């Protein structure tokens, strides 16, 4: 649960926050694209700091708990706030609809609607169904993101 930035990529995990709120930095290489990932935490008190990590971001990954219907509006609100930031105006958006293995998980179409993505007319975006614990869908999403970033 947190946000993560890379040189060109900002990963957002919007799930219940872990007990620790440390900042972790990691370098990830995928399809000849090297990302520096910053995990900056997702707690309410930390969210105002997120904008300090947006500079030079080309892609945003927003991870949503598809099984948490009670907090999906909070996720939508946070996503819309981030997308208003000037530093993210040109960033492509990849949404990971996580926990698709759960019986009551919202399908991609419902989550797309609840997040208001259909209103993003001037932004390239994609929603990928995922199950992080099994790795399902993660590479499909990263393939889409790599393809979009390679066009720039």
Image (tube, rainbow, N blue to C red):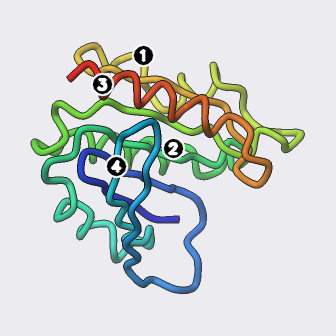
Residue plotted at (54% across, 25% down): 112
Q: Going by the image, does 88 lie left or right of 1?
A: left
Q: Could you classify mark 4 by the number of other residues whose Cα lies within 10 Å: few (under 14), some (14-19), or many (20 or more)? A: some
Residue plotted at (51% across, 56% down): 14
Tag 1 residue = 118
Q: Going by the image, does 23 lie left or right of 72?
A: left
Q: Secondary structure at mark 1?
A: helix
Q: Nearer the viewer, mark 2 or mark 3?
A: 3
Mark 1 and mark 4: Cα distance apart in space: 30 Å
Mark number for residue 30? none
Q: Could you classify mark 1 by the number of other residues whose Cα lies within 10 Å: few (under 14), some (14-19), or many (20 or more)? A: few
- Label whose residue precedes the other's in the sequence (4 or 3): 4
Tag 4 residue = 34
Q: Nearer the viewer, mark 3 or mark 1?
A: 3
In the depicted view, which residue is nearer to us: 131 or 34? 34
Q: Could you classify mark 2 by the number of other residues whose Cα lies within 10 Å: few (under 14), some (14-19), or many (20 or more)? A: some
Tag 3 residue = 150
Q: Is residue 126 above or below residue 6?
A: above
Contact between marks 4 and 2 (CB within 8 A): the answer is: no
Residue plotted at (27% across, 47% down): 82
């Amino acid at each position: 649960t947190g946000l993560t930035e890379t040189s060109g990529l900002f990963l957002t995990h919007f799930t219940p926050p872990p007990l620790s709120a440390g900042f972790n930095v990691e370098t990830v290489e995928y399809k000849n694209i090297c990302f520096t990932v910053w995990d900056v935490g997702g707690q309410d008190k930390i969210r105002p700091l997120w904008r300090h990590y947006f500079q030079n971001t080309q892609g945003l990954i927003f991870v949503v708990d598809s099984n948490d219907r009670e907090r999906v509006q909070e996720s939508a609100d946070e996503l819309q706030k981030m997308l208003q930031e000037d530093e993210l105006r040109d960033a492509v958006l990849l949404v990971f609809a996580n926990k698709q293995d759960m019986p009551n998980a919202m399908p991609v179409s419902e989550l797309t609607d609840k997040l208001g993505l259909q209103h993003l007319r001037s932004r390239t975006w994609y929603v990928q169904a995922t199950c992080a614990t099994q790795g399902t869908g993660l590479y499909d999403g990263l393939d889409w993101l790599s393809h979009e970033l390679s066009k720039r």
